[in-house]
Amino acid sequence: MTSKFTATSYEFAEYADARNVIGGAFVEDPGADLIDVMNPRHGKAMARVPMSGAAAVAAAVAAAREAQPAWARLPIRDRAQVFYRLRELMTRDLEELTWLVSHENGKVYEEAKGSVLKAIECVEFGCSLPNLAVGQQLDVSRGVNCMVVHEPLGVVAGICPFNFPLMVPMWMLPQAIVGGNAFIIKPSEQVPLSIQRLAVLFEEAGLPAGIFSVVNGGRAAVEALTDDPGIAALAFVGSTAVARQVYARGAATGKRMLCLGGAKNHLIVVPDADVELTTQNVVDSFTGCAGQRCMAASVMLGVGDVDHIVSGIAAKAEELRLGEQMGPITSDAAAARITDYINAAEESGVKVLVDGRGQRATDGGYWVGPTVLDGVTPDMPAGCEEIFGPVLSIIRVATVDEAITIENASEYGNASSVYTTSGDVAREVMERVSSGMCGVNVGVPVPREPFGFGGWNDSLFGHGNITGWDGFRFWTRPRKITSKWAAQKDQTWMS
Ligand code: NAD
């Protein structure tokens, strides 16, 4: 059992070291090195996490394989009951989970709470599955009935990034577990602590031992999960470079794979856009979670004369209170990477309208303030690479057509939005951008449940989306049963 996290403010607090969860028990991994879990606001270690590898994965797979058949035999309604109870427990512990996410990840309180609430929304979708997963049936010929049922795959696994410690795991867990699988999760080694609490809540909700396992670690654990023949399907969320590798390696073993990668999201802003709505939305989008969201605005394509909107964005970004309205960057290395992008853009002649370099909200911790770069070109690193920080790169263009051409040339395709009061412009952009999740006057166009989450191009490797009904289909396989109970007197070739 891992104790409760008792912090109720940003004040630094230590927490118990993370452990693996195998066969329903928290277990040490004596063979694994322990690394620090840093609180990014304070730059201090709040706990440690084992960097496990193949041995822990093999043990988790063995325990999961033993537990899964009995779980799969339960009716889906019974499996969903665990998620009804989990929803109540997560709601009961909302404050604790919020502060834990905030401490290990750096999100400000409201953002952390929003991410836990969104995780709960994913749990609710899991609760609804018995009503959705009714399958189909049809008399395909006289006296011959065909029906489809959704069967679990067996033991499945998920690998998660640092930026949403609880929410991204919940993109996977409800559909997979309600679908009858046993699940092994490998959280980011940077944020393994919320998952420790989740394991306790699963147990309290009545999930049988072995159906939810945790293996901590980094690359070695991921590769062991990818290679293990006992794992039938694997989902990954993280950067594009790793997503591509994991996808190829897992697919080579015959696994069903879905790997979500990075992003470079474009917001197209035309002069007729509502000034107040646009300025606030754009700032919220590129500074929310300190820009460490795969749905964050990264490039603003300003069409024609949008100086009035750019100056409004700059003014709002300047006003943002670091530490209260925007949190820290995940690590020292990430803060240095973001600063390097800003330096390189400035050296190329870009105007730094709002400069977050050197800003900090605490003495320790990793900080970069909101930054607005004006006059970026699409070929500059700040114009085409994922910065993953609170930096808005403004590219000036003459026409909507030019804006769409630049968006289309991006290797990524997670999100795109347009800011306009013209239905014609909105429709044109929505028809032509090369992104999976699009917004009209919406800065973070996340398709909430029950819609599926997933991008296009190098933002997603595999087929389908990770949330919603697509998620259920990913974690299950359809069985078609064709039945004929009575001998047909008037047989045809189809009978
Ligand atoms: P990351 O790719 O560095 O790490 C993701 C996971 O992969 C972690 O669990 C990590 O331990 C593991 N990993 C890291 N390097 C590995 C390697 N070489 N081989 C095997 N496994 C490895 O990503 P991150 O820094 O944790 O998260 C940020 C990235 O995730 C950004 O690119 C962001 O856009 C992306 N992201 C995408 C989505 C989406 O839905 N598309 C959602 C959230 C985050």
Image (cartoon, grey):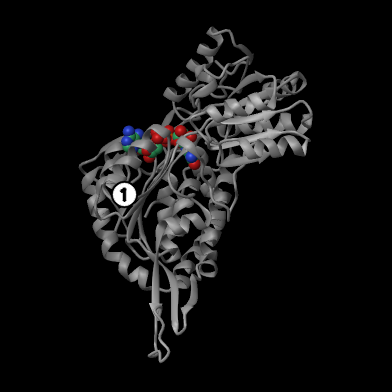
Residue 389 picture location, percent across and down: 53, 27
Residue 319 picture location, percent across and down: 70, 24
Is ligand 1 within 8 Å of the beta carbon of the residue shown at mark 1?
A: no
Q: Residue at x 41, y 82 (%)?
A: 492
Q: Residue at x 38, y 90 (%)?
A: 487
- Quadrant of the frame with the C terminus: bottom left
Q: Mark yes or no: residue 94 visible.
A: yes
Residue type at mark 1?
Answer: Asn
Viewer-side residue, 419 vs 127: 419
Viewer-side residue, 91 vs 422: 422
Element type at mark 1 = strand
Total labels: the figure holds 1
Residue 196 picture location, percent across and down: 40, 49
Residue 72 picture location, percent across and down: 36, 69
Counting other residues with Cα less than 10 Å from the Cα at mark 1, is it few (<14), some (14-19), or many (20 or more)? many
Disc 1 marks which residue?
20
| Apparent side of residue 306 relative to residue 446 in the rendered image (left or right) | right
Q: Residue at x 63, y 20 (%)?
A: 394
- Quadrant of the frame with the N terminus: bottom left
Image quadrant assignment for residue 362: top right
